[in-house]
Image (cartoon, rainbow, N blue to C red):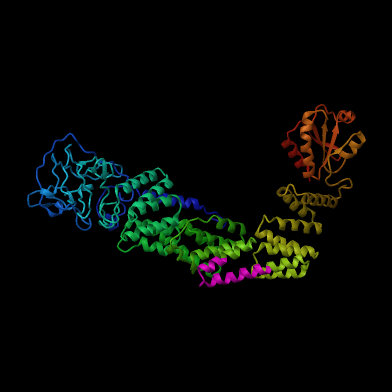
Amino acid sequence: MSHSGKINSEGGLNTLADRFKKSLKYDHKRNDNDKNGDVNKPDFRELDLGSPVSPLRPNVVATSSRSSSSSSSSSGSFSGRNDQNPVPKKSDSGSTTTNSGELSGSGRNSPTFSGRIKKQPVTRSSDSGGSHSNLVYSGGGSVSSPPANVLPAGNICPLGKSLKADVSVGRSSRPDVLGTGRGHYGHGSIMRGGGSVKFDGGSGSGGVGKSRGGELGGKGGMCGDGEELKRLGNEEYKKGHFSEALSLYDRAIAISPENAACHYNKAAALIGLKKLGMAVRECEEVLRLDPGYVRAHHRLGSLYLCLGQVENARRHICFTGIQPDPIELQKLQAVEMHLSKCTGARRIGDWKVVLKEADAAVASGADASPQLFACRAEALLKLRQYADAELSISKSPKVGTSSLSCSQTKFFGMLSEAYFLLVRSQIDMSMGRFDSAVTSVEKAAQLDPQSAEVSALLTNVRSVARARTRGNDLFKSERFTEASAAYGEGLRLNPSCSVLYCNRAACWYKLGQWERSLDDCNHALDIQPNYTKALLRRAASNSKLERWVEAVRDYDVLRKELPNDNDVAEALFHAQVGLRKSRGEEVHNMKFGGDVELVSGLEQFRAAISSPSASVVHFKSASDLQCNQISPFVDSLCSRYPSINFLKVDVQDSPGIANAENVKLVPTFKIYKNGSRLKEMICPSPEVLESSVRHYSF
């Protein structure tokens, strides 16, 4: 990468979004690999991308056959965390239950089913959307309501789990009917009077109190509406509709604000929208709700790495008890190495190495770091590549609102946000944006009042701004010598300020010191190549020094930038005349500007076209519509190209001229120089006419 190369921040962000999107695919494997760090097995708790719910099968007739005396089944609960695989246990009555809480009918507290419970084997779905089946209850019989305030034993949950007994479900006199399990993983939803409470989600390793999948019964759980909103958000996310997905996740969070999975999914949507600062905040919220959420640690570590915050990244990528991702760890180590070299080079002022290592850190994975883009800009500024420095700082990624941990991160010994503002202030000062420079460095000082580097720059910027104000006041009072001294004091404090060079050049011009004026204009244009005022003063200084080639070159550039500026046009004309004189050409008939000259006699016509400057002759007829339409445009060309002589001949009033020049049709335009015809155009368009005029102008 060259030192002035451009970094594509968008490309970096798109890569980040793609990298995280892959981690969101769903797998219905329900073990505790998440807690143990096996993040290669996606968890449905982040995005429900699995197979649809298996429907009830009404064509199988079943009868009640046995009950279980297991206390865990009769209470409809499961104990502790789901940290182990279910272990079958034999009940007193000989029936088999599992720790996952299969449904068992235990006497009075259980509703009586007019059918047999058919137990299907539990299978795992694959990433490609294979079939998934838990417990399927067949039969179309109704369920009679139990006594009031009594929880039916064996509430139906995914993978055969039972709900804890502390969940109260309202009772009514209407019969309870087994539903079809419309929500994901909600086989056998209990429906009352046409409504439903969907038992949706899974236990995971977070326990009842902090469920990631949205179990019912803990403060982290999610009711059916919230789970449905999350599912819809997942569908929008898969389609790449990140804004719509974000809105749905927000609605789900409003219903269940402590559901970690919703915050995790929201972070994914924010990454898709390139709002990395907000994504960091959501991941931190996930870890506040569930400090052991492995995937959130990995995602947050990757985000910090992209932002160039290596200390924060290492804390999460290498979180205690978690196996770090080898690829992310390798990136982290590379970024750390380049940042270390960059810091050392900056300390000794080796700006070429600073630029090289900053580029390498961005390429190694910190491609969304505003501070690294600011570091590139600072290095380019010190290397006097001012335009590239301005471009680098303007292309820095916009990460949005950041978290407290981000704002407290140090970069080159100062707070990261303060460093970015410090560089921004230096670039503003070099471009003459004094107010913006003062505002940026003052804000940096507020953020990090302890930074000696920020304090020093604040003092410097304020002093330079005062010197500029004092010089302006002296210039207005026509005290040019004192004004030049004031501008010089500002340049001593900051030798990269283009405006101060240009202002001092104006003082030298007024004092008749053309060479010094020319030197300061060159300094200003080195910093800011498109600085119009500096270019004007350099052209004027060259004219005073009779350096006509340089003066014509500068005025020609200005003429293109300021096509309606008559002063520039006249200055260009006089510079061109001076250039012709220096070459020994005849210039006695040349004049600037004026109106289109009417020529009626043949001798007058021949004298006019013999001028050493180009002459454009419009052969016209007062009765011709086309001639009348293009005449106003010819008048405008006359004012815009004052170095050209514009003539007009009415072929009806002056047939001798028309015959001598063999004009048969009107409007006809002919261009002459030194009495010789250079070009002829019959009925040209305005664009073609102006192009030819521009070509033959000085």
Q: Is residue 324 visible?
A: no
For the question of whether residue 585 can be seen, the reply is yes
Q: Quarter of the image holding residue 647?
A: top right
Question: Would residue 670 appear left or right of 336 to someone viewing this image?
Answer: right
Q: Residue furthest left?
A: 93
Relative depth, front residue between 346 and 451: 451
Residue 85: % across, % down: 20, 53
Residue 151 magenta: no
* Secondary structure mostly taken by the magenta-highlighted segment of the chain: helix
Residue 462 painted magenta: yes
Q: Which quadrant of the view contains residue 650?
A: top right
In the image, is residue 375 above or below residue 16?
below
Relative to 381, 280 lies left or right: left
State the image coordinates of residue 210 (x, y, percent, origin top left): 28, 57
* Relative horizontal placement of residue 64, taking residue 488 as reference (left or right): left
Q: In this image, 580 relative to 168: left or right?
A: right
Residue visible at 79% across and 35% down in the picture: 631
Q: Nearer the viewer, residue 265 or 581?
A: 265
Where residue 385 appears, as percent x and y from the top left, is 61, 59
Residue 123: % across, % down: 22, 44
In the depicted structure, whether residue 474 falls above or below residue 202 = below
- Magenta region, residue range: 441-467
Residue located farthest toward the front when viewing the structure as drawn: 173
Foreground: 583 or 635? 635
Q: State how many labels appear.
A: 0
Looking at the picture, tell me which residue is in the foreground, 76 or 466: 76
Where residue 640 sits, quadrant-wise, is: top right
Residue occupying image coordinates x 61% and y 59%: 386
